[in-house]
Amino acid sequence: MLTIAMPKGRIFEEALQLLRAAGFPLPLEFAQSRKLILTSEEAQLTFILAKPMDVPTYVEHGVCDVGIAGKDVLLEEQKDVYEVLDLKISACHLAVAGISGQTLDVVTPKIATKYPKVAAAYYRDKGEQVEIIKLNGSIELAPLIGLADRIVDIVSTGRTLQENGLVEFEKVSEITSRMIVNRASYYMKGPKIQEMVERLKEIV
Amino acid sequence: MTKPLMFEKPVGMRDTLPPLYDAKHNIRSVLMNSIVQWGYSFLQTPALEYYDTVGVTSSIADHQLFKLLDAEGQTLVLRPDVTAPIARVVSSIMKKEPFPLRLAYDSPVYRSLQKEGGRPAEFEQMGVELIGDKTSSADAEIVALMIALLEEIGLRDCKIAIGHVGFVDALFTDILSKEEDVDLLLRYLYEKNYVGYTHHVKNLSLSAQNEQRLLALLELKGGKETLKKAQAIGAQNSSPLLAEIDHLFDVLNMYGVQEKVSFDFSLRSHMSYYTGIIFEGYTANYGFPLCRGGRYDHLLQTFGRVAKAIGFALSIDDVMEALPPSGIQNKQECIIYSPSLRREAYEKAQALRRNGCAVVLQDVRGIDEMDHFTRRFSSVTYMLDTHQEGESC
């Protein structure tokens, strides 16, 4: 039995489709449940439904063997886990956005983001001095109400930015969902995990 | 910064209370006993070392070192590992000791934490170093000893992943011309980021064959058959090295541990002084490595004595977490006496102690709450004078 940490919501559904396509017999009504732990005896898999940001933590500590996590989360959380496969689902990118035409504040440019480590590393690489403001959601508000000059956030279709009158300035990095594996599980359950990787590799 | 509360400790520091201390002590004695039986001698090095000597060579990242200044303004470090201090000792005060040397240690090491999250900054390590023996017999002895120790403490369901730093280095030098590509790919391996590695290799505009060789490195895992595949993709000059690994596997076979061992040529360690085989040990139902080690053939010469060496360290804290709860019970006995019967009580206690019992000898007048106090003992003997005459102590 392998234990898989999964983000709730859209990624979970896409990941389920992927696993079904890879030949894991998972029931169709699986995703409708509100349970946090789902087991499929037939597929020999147990799913742990977690907050997306927490998936790498469960895997790092070994309470889950495998996890599916967005690259954005992996970049931010920097956990010590194997990143074995790009599943190419939930594609989007991390970008710098703000109000069109607005220049950066000369004293201290402020950057609002859900990803303080990623944002700090990005601006440090550019050699720019900025202040990072951590927010937990609705990041688009920050430039609109004058909390920050720019935001660093996930952009998938660009509609949220557009509807709030924001434009994308720079791309920070491409994001897709990745399969991650705990260090001990990688060896202790090696054959099972390799088999899963091989089966998924064929369809992504 | 607020002042710490009176009971607080620096981040990553832990108190060990009597039950855990006992359990650790038991495990430690089992481990030490085995290590001594395999012919290794324990030694101790100081907690503080110079930054310029041990601090620099230890290869623990600079920002993870605990640094302080001595009275002369020299920078000191709390020892971040024990291999570098042992290399210092072997090259200086043990300079005249002939090789090979088999040494062992049981010491805490200190690495400051980068992240919150409950991992300790003071690690108790038990380890061994086999210094001055370049043979693959030495490699096998170290790996076999590590497995023997895990088995000895009951972690039978374990796996050792073995990689080779030299193989990967030779492969990369053979294919890649730019050093920054080598560094980046090595970092991806160290971070276990196979997606990043694959992506970078595909963007390198290499010949199809070389691209395939680099990608195949990630698949070089498994038993003895892995060595043939390694031969196929490895650099020209890797043949002697693979022959040695092949021999290592045969010797491990002799030790009867070959099915606990699995090759993983993409394994990379954070310790940059490794030059040959490196390995990590895992057990079922515990998410972190318990032990790791490798061959370091150049470390000693930085301290002035040329010698090839190999060693490993076992993390006692990880071992304790990986072991099932020991259910250790307090085996203390208690004798509660009235002052007039002190001599008799003492003699009884000494008799029991001679038989190996742990005995608490307690004056009845010193006890606040009898029920609460006696609860923790496996047995209680009362030697009370019913007349309760008051005697001064």
Image: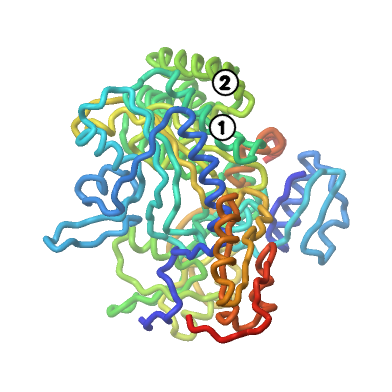
Residue B91 visible, this angle: yes
Q: What residue type is labelled 2?
A: Tyr
Q: Residue at 46% of width from left, 79% of height from top?
A: A143
Residue B55 image offset from top left, x and y in percent: 26, 49
Expressed as whole percent of the image width and height from the top left, the position of residue B220 reads: 55, 26
Asked if the residue under mark 1 is in contact with the one under mark 2, i.e. CB atoms within 8 Å, the reply is: yes
Q: Where is residue B103 in the image (x, y as percent from the top left)?
A: 37, 33
Residue at (55, 38) in percent of width and height: B281
Chain ID, mark 2: B
Query: Count of labels shown?
Result: 2
Q: Quadrant of the N terminus of chain B?
A: bottom left
Task: Give the colouring mode of the picture.
Answer: rainbow
What residue would you read off at disc 2? B255
Q: Circle 2 sits in a helix, a strand or a loop, which is it?
A: helix
Mark 1 is surrounded, within 10 Å at the Cα level, by few (under 14), some (14 to 19) or many (20 or more) other residues, namely many
Residue B337 figure quarter: bottom right
Q: Which residue is drawn at 54% across and 44% down?
A: B289
Give the residue at mark 1: B147
* Horizontal side, residue A166 vs residue A90: left or right: left
Find residue A90 and report its horizontal and vertical position in percent. Answer: 64, 55
C-alpha span from label 2 to label 1: 10 Å
User: Callout 2: few (<14), some (14-19), or many (20+) C-alpha neighbours within 10 Å?
Assistant: some
Q: What's the residue at 41%, 37% (across, down)?
A: B186
Vertical placement of residue A94 versus B307, above or below: below
Residue type of the residue flagged with mark 1: Ile
The residue lying toward the viewer, choosing from A157 and A175, is: A175
Q: What element carries label 1?
A: helix
